[in-house]
Image: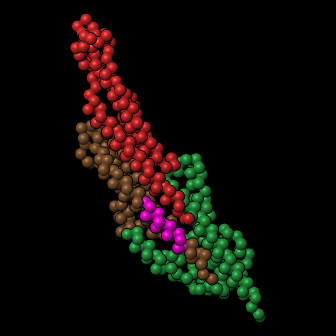
Amino acid sequence: MLFPTFQTAGSGLGLFRTWMDAVSDNMANLDTVRPTSEAAFQARFVVANAIGNGQEAMTGGPAGAQVTGISFGDANGRLMHDPSNPLADADGMVRFPDIDMGEQMTQLMIAQRGYQANLAVIDRAKDAYQQALSIGR
Amino acid sequence: MAISAIAGAAASLPTVPTLPATGQIGWLGDVGTAGSAGTATGTVAAGAAGAVSGTQSFGQTLVKALDGLQGTQTRADGLAVQAATGDLTNVHDYMIAATEASLATELTVAVRNKAVEAFNQIMNMGV
Amino acid sequence: MIDSTASVIYSALNGLAARQRVIANNVANVETPGFIAGRVTFEDSLRTAIANGDDAVTSSVSTRSSTDPVNMNGNNVSLDNEVVGLTQTDLAYQLLIQAINQKFGLLRTAIGGGA
């Protein structure tokens, strides 16, 4: 692979962007109410795995991280008493999603940090490769 | 480490690579063919500034470059093909090989030119 | 390689390039659960080869797992260390590129200059 570092860092960018998308999906649905007859809105979690093993990374083979799936949070959600809600059942209960805003914000900051770190890798690697291209000039 | 080693090499910049002062003038047929540049340099007489001793690493460098011309060009070509098909992992590999090949070529040409010049000088001397 | 110094520089360039790739892998996996950071070593092998008077091509570049402590996810990548390592690696790489260029410059001067 020519310039393998770009592929590796690019895979990291993809992973963290997917994570940020999942978090924003969760935060957008913080107040999505469902009736007790249905499952609550489930939080989205990104399942990440490394690509290849560390040995291959050294020789320029496949490396980086990838999303291998999305897992979903608790389907039961939180039961709240809200009789005025049109979706409330006979007891006046509705399902709220089991999503904590504070935790989602923390995840967003972690994902952002990871994204920026991979951007820095790309930038630095580009400098090194450009320098290599000037050998013999 | 690397920096002091380079300073050492610069300090040992020599005169001319191994051109023994033998006085032979029978090598005319070899001039002009890059592949036999090694032979041509071995028998040039006039203009030879004396042999460089074997321990001079820079002098050895130039001779090795002459001998290995074909090899460097093949290696550079092979790496270029790898770069083109996207199989090259270390870009500095190709850049170094390409520079080596071009320098070896320049060296061969320069040595040949000097040899021809020296021969002409001899031929122009009166009897 | 041209001479023994150039051979050493070349081996170091290979080692640094490998290190940069492993650091990139570590950074991409900074949040992957259970991921253990990789570390590339080549300096010791290179030093040994030089001390023994061997050609630098006999030295090796190898990778091992980092022994840093893991966090709750089982991941032990420290982003700060990786970024510092990446900066060092890339600058060292650029320095050695200058060094090899300088070696070639000497050759070129010898070829082209003088009568």
Q: Is residue B65 above or below residue A67?
A: below
In the picture, measured across the screen, residue B36 lies left or right of residue C73, that is right
Q: Is residue A11 above or below residue B122?
A: above
- Depth check: A106 or C23 in front? A106
- Depth check: B57 or B84 in front? B84
Q: Can the viewer see residue A25 in this picture?
A: yes
Find residue B7 and report its horizontal and vertical position in percent.
43, 75
Report which colour depicts chain A: red
Give the magenta part as a residue range: C93-107
Q: Which chain is green?
A: B
Q: Where the C terminus of chain A falls, by quadrant? A: bottom right
Q: Outermost residue, top direction?
A: A90
Q: Which chain is brown?
A: C
In the picture, measured across the screen, residue B21 lies left or right of residue C67, that is right
Find residue A123 and report its horizontal and vertical position in percent.
44, 51
Find residue B35 and report its horizontal and vertical position in percent.
66, 68
Does residue C94 belong to the magenta stretch? yes
Residue beneath the point at 43% across and 76% down: B8
Main SS of the magenta part reads: helix
Does residue A108 belong to the magenta stretch? no
